[in-house]
Image (cartoon, helix red, strand yellow):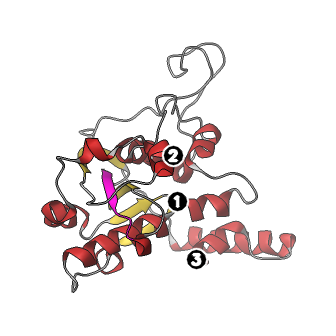
Protein backbone atom coordinates (compact mmCIF):
# COMPACT_ATOMS: atom_id res chain seq x y z
CA UNK A 1 0.00 0.00 0.00
CA UNK A 2 1.32 3.45 -0.94
CA UNK A 3 0.22 6.23 1.39
CA UNK A 4 1.09 9.91 1.30
CA UNK A 5 0.89 11.79 4.60
CA UNK A 6 0.09 15.36 3.58
CA UNK A 7 -0.27 18.80 5.12
CA UNK A 8 -0.66 22.32 3.75
CA UNK A 9 -0.28 25.86 5.02
CA UNK A 10 -2.47 28.59 3.57
CA UNK A 11 -3.03 32.35 3.44
CA UNK A 12 -6.27 32.00 5.37
CA UNK A 13 -9.19 29.72 6.11
CA UNK A 14 -11.48 29.76 3.07
CA UNK A 15 -10.59 29.08 -0.57
CA UNK A 16 -13.99 30.58 -1.47
CA UNK A 17 -12.62 33.90 -0.17
CA UNK A 18 -9.65 33.67 -2.51
CA UNK A 19 -7.21 32.16 -0.04
CA UNK A 20 -4.41 30.03 -1.46
CA UNK A 21 -1.94 27.31 -0.51
CA UNK A 22 1.53 28.62 0.40
CA UNK A 23 3.23 25.39 1.51
CA UNK A 24 2.74 21.70 0.72
CA UNK A 25 4.54 19.00 2.67
CA UNK A 26 4.27 15.24 2.06
CA UNK A 27 6.01 12.07 3.22
CA UNK A 28 5.59 8.64 1.65
CA UNK A 29 4.71 5.38 3.37
CA UNK A 30 5.03 2.05 1.60
CA UNK A 31 3.48 -0.83 3.54
CA UNK A 32 3.54 1.40 6.65
CA UNK A 33 7.26 2.18 6.35
CA UNK A 34 8.65 5.66 5.72
CA UNK A 35 10.63 5.64 2.48
CA UNK A 36 12.36 9.03 2.64
CA UNK A 37 10.60 10.07 -0.59
CA UNK A 38 9.16 13.48 0.30
CA UNK A 39 7.50 16.36 -1.55
CA UNK A 40 7.95 19.85 -0.15
CA UNK A 41 7.29 23.19 -1.78
CA UNK A 42 6.67 26.78 -0.72
CA UNK A 43 4.36 28.68 -3.09
CA UNK A 44 3.80 32.30 -4.12
CA UNK A 45 0.04 32.88 -3.61
CA UNK A 46 -0.30 36.25 -5.45
CA UNK A 47 -2.18 37.69 -2.48
CA UNK A 48 -1.52 38.87 1.06
CA UNK A 49 -1.40 36.37 3.92
CA UNK A 50 -3.82 37.01 6.78
CA UNK A 51 -2.11 38.21 9.95
CA UNK A 52 -3.76 35.41 11.93
CA UNK A 53 -2.36 32.81 9.55
CA UNK A 54 1.17 34.23 9.89
CA UNK A 55 0.88 33.83 13.66
CA UNK A 56 0.15 30.13 13.13
CA UNK A 57 2.84 29.19 10.58
CA UNK A 58 5.25 32.14 10.56
CA UNK A 59 5.42 32.29 6.75
CA UNK A 60 5.53 35.87 5.45
CA UNK A 61 4.72 37.54 2.14
CA UNK A 62 8.36 38.62 1.80
CA UNK A 63 9.61 35.04 2.21
CA UNK A 64 7.32 33.81 -0.58
CA UNK A 65 8.11 36.62 -3.03
CA UNK A 66 10.53 34.53 -5.14
CA UNK A 67 8.80 31.16 -4.76
CA UNK A 68 7.08 29.31 -7.64
CA UNK A 69 3.33 29.37 -8.14
CA UNK A 70 1.11 26.31 -7.88
CA UNK A 71 0.86 26.13 -11.67
CA UNK A 72 4.64 25.71 -11.82
CA UNK A 73 4.63 22.59 -9.64
CA UNK A 74 1.14 21.20 -10.32
CA UNK A 75 2.22 18.36 -12.63
CA UNK A 76 4.99 17.19 -10.28
CA UNK A 77 2.61 17.31 -7.31
CA UNK A 78 -0.16 15.40 -9.08
CA UNK A 79 2.33 12.76 -10.25
CA UNK A 80 3.57 12.36 -6.67
CA UNK A 81 0.13 11.81 -5.10
CA UNK A 82 -1.60 10.06 -8.00
CA UNK A 83 -3.10 6.70 -7.02
CA UNK A 84 -2.01 6.87 -3.38
CA UNK A 85 -4.08 6.99 -0.23
CA UNK A 86 -3.73 10.45 1.30
CA UNK A 87 -3.46 10.56 5.10
CA UNK A 88 -4.49 14.04 6.28
CA UNK A 89 -5.51 15.52 9.63
CA UNK A 90 -8.80 17.38 9.09
CA UNK A 91 -8.82 16.27 5.47
CA UNK A 92 -11.76 18.44 4.24
CA UNK A 93 -9.67 21.57 4.86
CA UNK A 94 -6.58 20.49 2.90
CA UNK A 95 -8.51 18.66 0.18
CA UNK A 96 -10.73 21.71 -0.33
CA UNK A 97 -7.69 23.91 -0.87
CA UNK A 98 -5.97 21.41 -3.17
CA UNK A 99 -9.12 21.06 -5.29
CA UNK A 100 -9.34 24.86 -5.48
CA UNK A 101 -5.74 25.10 -6.69
CA UNK A 102 -6.26 22.31 -9.23
CA UNK A 103 -9.30 24.08 -10.68
CA UNK A 104 -7.44 27.38 -10.92
CA UNK A 105 -4.61 25.55 -12.69
CA UNK A 106 -6.90 23.69 -15.11
CA UNK A 107 -10.70 24.06 -14.90
CA UNK A 108 -11.21 20.52 -16.23
CA UNK A 109 -8.67 19.00 -13.83
CA UNK A 110 -9.66 15.86 -11.92
CA UNK A 111 -10.33 16.44 -8.22
CA UNK A 112 -8.44 14.78 -5.38
CA UNK A 113 -11.19 12.21 -4.90
CA UNK A 114 -10.79 11.18 -8.55
CA UNK A 115 -7.06 10.59 -8.09
CA UNK A 116 -6.69 9.26 -4.54
CA UNK A 117 -8.36 7.70 -1.56
CA UNK A 118 -8.41 9.97 1.49
CA UNK A 119 -8.07 8.93 5.14
CA UNK A 120 -8.95 11.67 7.65
CA UNK A 121 -6.95 11.03 10.83
CA UNK A 122 -9.03 13.60 12.73
CA UNK A 123 -12.20 11.60 12.04
CA UNK A 124 -10.34 8.40 12.97
CA UNK A 125 -9.07 9.95 16.22
CA UNK A 126 -12.58 11.13 17.13
CA UNK A 127 -13.88 7.57 16.73
CA UNK A 128 -11.06 6.14 18.83
CA UNK A 129 -11.10 8.90 21.47
CA UNK A 130 -14.62 10.41 21.62
CA UNK A 131 -15.03 13.48 23.77
CA UNK A 132 -11.29 14.17 23.96
CA UNK A 133 -9.03 16.70 22.27
CA UNK A 134 -7.79 15.24 19.01
CA UNK A 135 -5.64 17.95 17.48
CA UNK A 136 -2.11 16.98 16.47
CA UNK A 137 -0.51 18.22 19.69
CA UNK A 138 -3.02 16.29 21.83
CA UNK A 139 -2.41 13.12 19.82
CA UNK A 140 1.34 13.52 20.22
CA UNK A 141 0.88 13.63 24.00
CA UNK A 142 -1.52 10.68 23.96
CA UNK A 143 0.76 8.47 21.85
CA UNK A 144 4.01 9.78 23.35
CA UNK A 145 5.33 11.25 20.10
CA UNK A 146 8.05 13.85 20.64
CA UNK A 147 6.99 17.14 19.03
CA UNK A 148 9.09 19.44 21.21
CA UNK A 149 10.76 20.84 18.06
CA UNK A 150 7.39 22.13 16.76
CA UNK A 151 7.15 25.82 17.68
CA UNK A 152 5.08 26.82 14.65
CA UNK A 153 3.01 24.90 12.14
CA UNK A 154 4.91 23.82 9.03
CA UNK A 155 3.57 21.56 6.30
CA UNK A 156 6.51 19.16 6.01
CA UNK A 157 7.19 19.04 9.77
CA UNK A 158 3.50 18.44 10.51
CA UNK A 159 3.34 15.71 7.85
CA UNK A 160 6.35 13.98 9.44
CA UNK A 161 4.77 14.20 12.91
CA UNK A 162 1.40 13.04 11.60
CA UNK A 163 3.05 10.00 9.99
CA UNK A 164 4.40 8.96 13.42
CA UNK A 165 1.01 9.62 15.05
CA UNK A 166 -0.87 7.70 12.36
CA UNK A 167 1.42 4.68 12.64
CA UNK A 168 1.06 4.70 16.44
CA UNK A 169 -2.71 5.22 16.29
CA UNK A 170 -3.28 2.36 13.84
CA UNK A 171 -0.52 -0.04 14.86
CA UNK A 172 -0.69 -0.24 18.63
CA UNK A 173 2.26 0.24 20.94
CA UNK A 174 5.33 1.81 19.34
CA UNK A 175 7.71 1.78 22.32
CA UNK A 176 8.24 -0.40 25.39
CA UNK A 177 9.73 0.81 28.65
CA UNK A 178 10.50 -1.69 31.41
CA UNK A 179 11.31 1.01 33.95
CA UNK A 180 14.27 3.28 34.51
CA UNK A 181 16.01 5.51 31.99
CA UNK A 182 16.26 4.19 28.45
CA UNK A 183 17.45 5.54 25.14
CA UNK A 184 13.80 5.77 24.06
CA UNK A 185 13.16 8.58 26.55
CA UNK A 186 13.93 12.18 25.73
CA UNK A 187 16.20 13.64 28.43
CA UNK A 188 14.60 11.35 31.02
CA UNK A 189 11.21 12.93 30.48
CA UNK A 190 9.46 9.63 29.76
CA UNK A 191 8.34 10.83 26.31
CA UNK A 192 8.94 7.92 23.96
CA UNK A 193 10.26 8.46 20.46
CA UNK A 194 9.11 6.33 17.56
CA UNK A 195 11.90 3.91 16.65
CA UNK A 196 11.81 3.50 12.89
CA UNK A 197 12.96 0.25 11.34
CA UNK A 198 15.46 0.42 8.47
CA UNK A 199 13.77 0.95 5.11
CA UNK A 200 15.80 -1.89 3.56
CA UNK A 201 14.89 -4.53 6.17
CA UNK A 202 13.49 -7.88 5.05
CA UNK A 203 9.69 -7.62 4.71
CA UNK A 204 7.78 -9.25 7.55
CA UNK A 205 6.02 -12.51 6.80
CA UNK A 206 2.27 -12.00 6.57
CA UNK A 207 0.15 -14.81 8.05
CA UNK A 208 -3.50 -14.32 7.19
CA UNK A 209 -6.37 -15.62 9.30
CA UNK A 210 -8.08 -18.78 8.08
CA UNK A 211 -11.82 -19.21 7.58
CA UNK A 212 -12.24 -20.78 11.02
CA UNK A 213 -10.36 -17.95 12.73
CA UNK A 214 -12.42 -15.32 10.90
CA UNK A 215 -15.62 -17.07 11.96
CA UNK A 216 -14.42 -17.16 15.59
CA UNK A 217 -13.57 -13.46 15.34
CA UNK A 218 -17.06 -12.57 14.08
CA UNK A 219 -18.64 -14.68 16.80
CA UNK A 220 -16.58 -12.88 19.42
CA UNK A 221 -17.65 -9.48 18.05
CA UNK A 222 -21.27 -10.62 18.20
CA UNK A 223 -20.82 -11.58 21.89
CA UNK A 224 -19.30 -8.15 22.64
CA UNK A 225 -22.13 -6.36 20.82
CA UNK A 226 -24.78 -8.31 22.77
CA UNK A 227 -23.08 -7.53 26.06
CA UNK A 228 -22.71 -3.84 25.14
CA UNK A 229 -26.24 -3.50 23.82
CA UNK A 230 -25.05 -2.21 20.46
CA UNK A 231 -22.39 -2.58 17.77
CA UNK A 232 -18.82 -2.88 19.04
CA UNK A 233 -16.29 -0.17 18.14
CA UNK A 234 -14.63 -2.58 15.68
CA UNK A 235 -17.90 -3.16 13.86
CA UNK A 236 -18.60 0.57 13.69
CA UNK A 237 -15.13 1.24 12.21
CA UNK A 238 -15.53 -1.54 9.63
CA UNK A 239 -18.99 -0.19 8.70
CA UNK A 240 -17.54 3.23 7.97
Q: Which residue is mark 3?
A: 240
Give the camera-side residue of 221 and 133.
133
Q: Residue at x 39, y 41 (%)?
A: 157
Q: Quadrant of the N terminus?
A: bottom left
Give me the disc on residue 121.
Answer: 1
Q: Would you say the magenta stretch is mainly helix, strand or loop?
A: strand
Which label's residue is closer to the chain start, 3 or 1? Answer: 1
- Residue 175, relative to residue 104: is it above or below? above
Give me the disc on residue 233.
Answer: none
- Residue 155, relative to residue 45: is it above or below? above
Count the labels in the image.
3
Front label number (3 vs 1)? 1
Q: Is residue 92 visible?
A: yes
Q: Magenta stretch: give its range.
A: 18-26
Residue 42 lies left or right of residue 206; in this view the side is: left
Q: CA distance from mark 3 to mark 2?
A: 21 Å
Q: Residue at x 39, y 57 (%)?
A: 10
Q: Which residue is mark 2?
A: 165
Give the camera-side residue of 46 and 147.
46
Amino acid sequence: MRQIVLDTETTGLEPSDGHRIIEIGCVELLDRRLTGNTFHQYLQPDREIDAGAIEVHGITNEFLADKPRFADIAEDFVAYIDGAELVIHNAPFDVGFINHELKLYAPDSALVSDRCRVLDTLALARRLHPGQKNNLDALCRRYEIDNSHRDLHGALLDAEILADVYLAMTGGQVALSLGGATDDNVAGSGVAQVRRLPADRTPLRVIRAGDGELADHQARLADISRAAGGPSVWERIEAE
